[in-house]
Image (tube, rainbow, N blue to C red):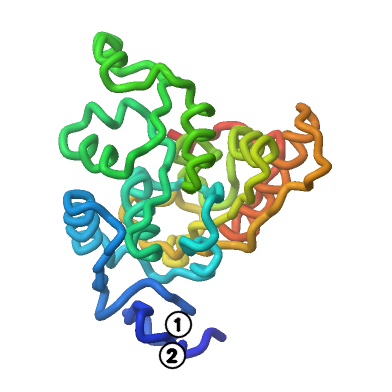
């Protein structure tokens, strides 16, 4: 049973839950489904966008747990979490900025989203790491790729951010997976960067406690975020294919535990993945 009223410091923000039965420890929100957003470390335009987006969609967040693991004092780290809704790509970076007084976690973002009016501008305000792996739909739009992507590889962009002391965010599943029970196998990027640079991975799970059992996760479903203890790579670990795969398995297992899903190394794309 979660405490009915967690104790919060004067600089802590608190969420007033609409569900009177279940209360969660939190250190991010303030007021009845609203956010107290001062964000002193964020530039004016991103701050305005972050505030506006959280006012519109902040009520979708039921609770946040383990926020101390992603505080600004923990930088740099790699945040790795499951991905079940398109909206998470904008909403979760905004929540992280609120938790960290405006200090951003820079997420990897598919370049195709940059072509969507307003959405592309919002994503750019997070100073994302642009992924150019996918082709545009329709393919004719691929002519825009050189203007929207970087000549620097995705991993090199991530390395640069981490070496600058900044944290990055990765959805290892690399697509929206609406399966309520299973994670996809995932890609090894977070594990490779962690081993190579010696930075910890913060696993996180996004849960949907109000989701009807056995049904695909809806875009509008409310969720809670659970940040886990940092996973620190061994200093003696050699950067080999087997080491990366083993570390990736540990990361995905932690995400599975925090998200309440199952993960197996042979999990393939299924009908709920888009």
Q: Quadrant of residue 267?
A: top right
From this viewpoint, which residue is outermost toward the front?
164
Could you tell me which residue is drawn at 59 percent across and 33 percent down?
A: 189
Q: Tell me what residue is drawn at x 53 percent, y 84 percent.
A: 2
- Give the percent coordinates (x, y) of residue 16: 32, 81
For this rendering, which residue is in front, 209 or 249?
249
Neighbourhood count class around disc 2 (C-alpha, 10 Å): few under 14, some 14–19, many 20 upward = few
Q: Position of residue 130 (x, y in %)?
A: 39, 29
Q: In front here: 57 or 48? A: 48
At x 21%, y 60%, the residue is: 51
Element under disc 1: loop
Q: CA distance from mark 2 to mark 1?
A: 7 Å
Q: Is residue 16 above or below residue 78?
A: below
Q: Residue at x 70, y 34 (%)?
A: 266
Q: Is residue 55 left or right of residue 4?
A: left
Depicted 159 relative to depicted 73: above or below = above
Residue 80 appears in the rendering = no
- Whole-percent x and y of residue 206? 49, 57
Pointer 1 residue: 23
Q: Which labelled disc corresponds to residue 5?
A: 2
In the rendered image, the quadrant that contains the N terminus is: bottom right
How many dots with numbers? 2
Name the N-terminal-most of marks 2 and 1.
Answer: 2
Marks 2/1 in contact by CB < 8 Å: the verdict is yes
């Amino acid at each position: 049973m979660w405490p009915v009223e967690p104790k919060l410091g004067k600089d802590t923000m608190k969420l007033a839950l609409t569900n009177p039965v279940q209360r969660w420890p939190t250190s991010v929100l303030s007021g009845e489904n609203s956010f107290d957003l001062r964000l002193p470390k964020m530039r004016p335009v991103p701050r305005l966008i972050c505030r506006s987006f959280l006012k519109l969609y902040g009520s979708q967040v039921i609770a946040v747990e383990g926020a101390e693991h992603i505080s600004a004092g923990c930088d740099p780290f790699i945040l790795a979490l499951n991905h079940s809704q398109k909206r998470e790509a904008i909403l979760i970076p905004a929540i992280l900025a609120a938790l960290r007084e405006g200090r951003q976690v820079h997420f990897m973002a598919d370049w195709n989203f940059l072509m969507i009016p307003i959405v592309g501008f919002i994503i750019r305000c997070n100073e994302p790491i642009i992924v150019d792996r996918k082709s545009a739909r329709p393919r004719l739009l691929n002519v825009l790729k050189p203007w929207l992507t970087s000549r620097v590889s995705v991993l090199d962009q991530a390395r640069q951010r981490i070496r600058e002391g900044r944290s990055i965010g990765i959805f290892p599943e690399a697509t929206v997976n609406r399966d309520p029970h299973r994670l996809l196998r995932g890609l090894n990027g977070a594990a490779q960067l962690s081993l190579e640079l010696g930075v910890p991975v913060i696993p996180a799970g996004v849960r949907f406690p109000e989701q009807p059992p056995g049904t695909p996760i809806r875009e509008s479903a409310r969720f809670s975020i659970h940040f886990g203890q940092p996973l620190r790579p061994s200093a003696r670990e050699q950067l080999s294919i087997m080491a990366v795969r083993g570390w990736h398995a540990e990361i995905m297992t932690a995400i599975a535990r925090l998200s309440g899903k199952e993960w197996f190394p042979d999990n393939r794309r299924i009908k709920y993945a888009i």
